Image (cartoon, rainbow, N blue to C red):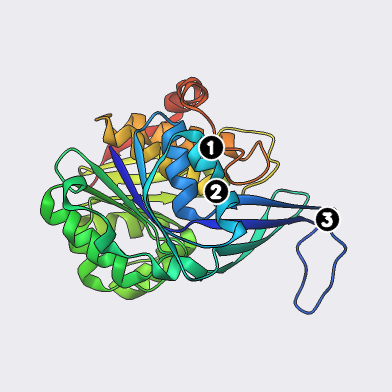
Amino acid sequence: MILVFGSINLDLVARVPRLPRPGETLAGEHFSAQPGGKGANQALAAQRAGGRVAMAGAVGNDAFATTALASLAAGGVDLALVRHVPAATGVALIHVDDSGENSITVIAGANAHADADDVPAALLRTGNTVLLQLEVPLPAVCTLARRAHEAGARVILNAAPANTLPPDIFEALDVLVVNELEADVIATTLGVPTLPEAFAAGVHRRFGFAVVVTLGAQGALAVAGGEWLRVPAPAVDVRDTTGAGDAFTGALAVALDRGDRWPQALAEGVAAGSLACTGEGAQAALPVAAAIHCFAENVQPQLVSSPLR
């Protein structure tokens, strides 16, 4: 089972010809309000990838909450640990340009009230996976990571959005997932090299946990169990990159949770992230298990592995 502790947002999405420059007003082409938030996205991504998922977090007592939770509820994610609090539901303001690139501003709202104490000890046990991100209060993330680690659960941290982390959180992780920007911020904190390959190797050698760096259109690399892994991204018709990283992380978590080896897990993550780019919106474009497994069969032969020296 996978427990996701993280953000739940309503995404307000504007399609624009290009991303606006500072001080510039652009005429948009289309607007939509869609469920989002990195926590909710990854919970639904994992559920669609074949996992059994529970979501823990917070929403407001407002109309936005209903829309923000709609896809999770329809997808079968367990929402018993989602609290309604006296604050506005979190919102993300998203611009998406004609090439599929995006820029995002997040307002935490109710997500600032997410509380690690809401997660019962019964869910933090050996055989379960706890998936965390950084759109809820960092002290709560650190607390839950430590609790889960001490109880024997697998702890995966997607350190997004980029933030400076307290060094002790790294003692509680089994897997760290970052993009290149997030790796750069963590590298500065830890005093390790910033280039993706050197970063992954340096962090793995220091702490022993698996390190994954997503590389956008270049795929992803990982250092796990003393081995290098690298998977290029397949060519796809990119419509919207919003949520691609969440699709990757959710599918990766599911593969690890069911006991797959790292080459398969990384291939499925890249397959899911690539497929998510072919649709519009964060949650609406998340692929299902059958599509991920089929696409991963084309991805895995391109995987390159070697011992870490």
Element on which disc 2 rests: helix
Toward the viewer: 136 or 69? 69
Q: Give the residue number, with chain letter if any, for mark 3.
A: 17
Tell me: 128 left or right of 263: left
Question: How busy is the neighbourhood of tag 3: few (under 14 within 10 Å), some, or many (20 plus)?
Answer: some
Q: Quadrant of the N terminus?
A: top left
Q: Give the residue number, with chain letter if any, for mark 2.
A: 216
Vertical position of residue 249 compared to residue 171: above or below: above
Determine the residue positioned at 85% across, 53% down: 29
**In the image, which is nearer the foreground, mark 2 or mark 3?**
3
Q: Which mark is residue 160?
A: none
Q: Exactly how many numbered labels are in the figure?
A: 3
Q: CA distance from mark 1 to mark 2?
A: 8 Å
Q: CA distance from mark 2 to mark 3?
A: 21 Å
First reached walking from the N terminus: tag 3 or tag 1: 3
Q: Is residue 100 visible?
A: yes
Q: CA distance from mark 3 to mark 1?
A: 25 Å
Question: How busy is the neighbourhood of tag 1: few (under 14 within 10 Å), some, or many (20 plus)?
Answer: many
Percent x, y for residue 224?
26, 44
